[in-house]
Each structure stands twice: as structure tokens, then as C-alpha cells.
Image: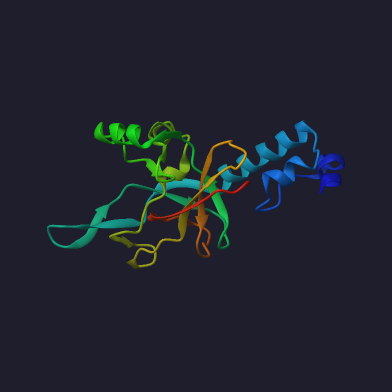
Amino acid sequence: MQKLCTECPESGQIFWPRNFKSRQKSTMNIPAPIVARITATAVQRNNNTLYVTRSKLFRKFPVDNTYTRSIGHGFFTSVTILPNQRIIQFNGEVILAQEYHLRTARGQGGYIIQLSDTDYLDCYKTRWDNQCLASIANCALHCFDSATNRLARNNAELKAYHHTDQRGWIASLVTTRHIGPQTEIIISFLKKNFGSYLL
């Protein structure tokens, strides 16, 4: 891998292997320009395969008890994603519980994610600045999926990890089952997995 990254950067696009840990990357002594290229390529690949369009989900309309109320935009993939794969990282500001309650009281709690018993990730500003695509993903709760013609099912979940080297939190969307191309990514915000691992 080290030889490939240092001697063959012009042979085509290069990527870190899936689930490659930061500790493994740091011990490989890859030149900084090559690391920057790998990172930029990964961002470009995400931008090319993940997109936002009108959601296929509908909520129940209370008047006639039918699923006719559109929930707006949704988060989609144009390629197949296998189970237990990281899709994209949330981008926001880590805040404490007290600040979380203050912002929620101001009506800005719609894009805040709980990371632990004391820490939260506020994606409100980054969501509306189009800097956090992950925040657009919808939840299947009480929704009907017009793409499958049945009640919606989640296909991803939130996983949050705290770096042991004190670099902070990382929260990501991770697939829970196979997702086909042109499929909406639907996440359960009720189930959260927390960890303290060095990624």
C-alpha cells in the first residue's frame, strides 16, 4: 500500500482501503501531498455518489389517516453500498447538555445529535449552509415509502466515536443492510451506537 501511494500516484485515483484506521495511516509515512490527494479524491467520490432530491417518504395525514404528506427532501445514493459501511460523516459543533437545551428552546434543536450523556453535535448551521449532507437523511418512523409501496424501513444508523487521542468526536451514517443504487438513505435517530475507539 505504501509503495502504491508513493510511487504510483499518477496511475489513477487512489483511496484508503475501507475501514482503514487513522493509526494505520499515520504509520505508513505517506508524503503529505499524496495524503491530501487521497483525501480530496474521497470527498469528490462522495459528492459524485451521494445526492439530495425529493424524498420518497410520506407521513400520515391526520385528517383522513392516509400517508399523503410529503416530508420534503431526502438523501440518496447513486451506487450500491454494502452493510456496515460508513456512508458520510456529520459536520457540526460539539456542545454540552446545557447549551443543547438553550438552543432547543430557541427552536434550533432539529439538527442536534446526541453523542453521549453529556455531549451533543449541533448540525443546525452546517445543515442550512449545505455543509452537512448527512443531516438531510430522514427517519422511517411513522412514514410510508412510495418507492417500495410499504411502510418505510431504516437502512442506516448513527455511530459516534470519541477518539482516544483527544481529537474529539466523529459521528457518521453507517449502513445496517444492503442499499441499492438510486435508493434513499433512511436512518434511525432513536438508536445510537457510541464508542471510544481510535479510528
Q: Say which residue appears at 74% left-offset and 40% top-offset.
A: 26
Determine if residue 67 is in view.
yes
Q: Looking at the picture, tell me which residue is in the foreground, 4 or 123.
A: 123
Q: Is residue 94 above or below residue 20?
A: above
Judge by depth and name the residue closer to the eye, 61 or 173. Answer: 173
Whole-percent x and y of residue 162?
Answer: 54, 44
Report the side of 6 relative to 26 (left or right).
Answer: right
In screen coordinates, is 123 left or right of 61?
right
**Residue 38 at x, y percent in the picture:** 71, 40
What's the colour scheme? rainbow
Q: Residue at x 81, y 49 (%)?
A: 1
Q: Position of residue 113 (x, y in %)?
A: 40, 43
Q: Is residue 14 visible?
A: no
Indicate the quadrant where residue 45 lies.
top right
Which of these two is toward me, 124 or 50? Answer: 124
Name the image quarter holding residue 44. top right
Picture coordinates of residue 41, whole percent (x, y): 67, 40
- Report the number of numbered marks: 0
Residue located at (35% from left, 37% from top): 97
Q: Residue furthest bottom?
A: 150
Rendered view: 151 above or below 10: below
Residue 18, above or below 131: below
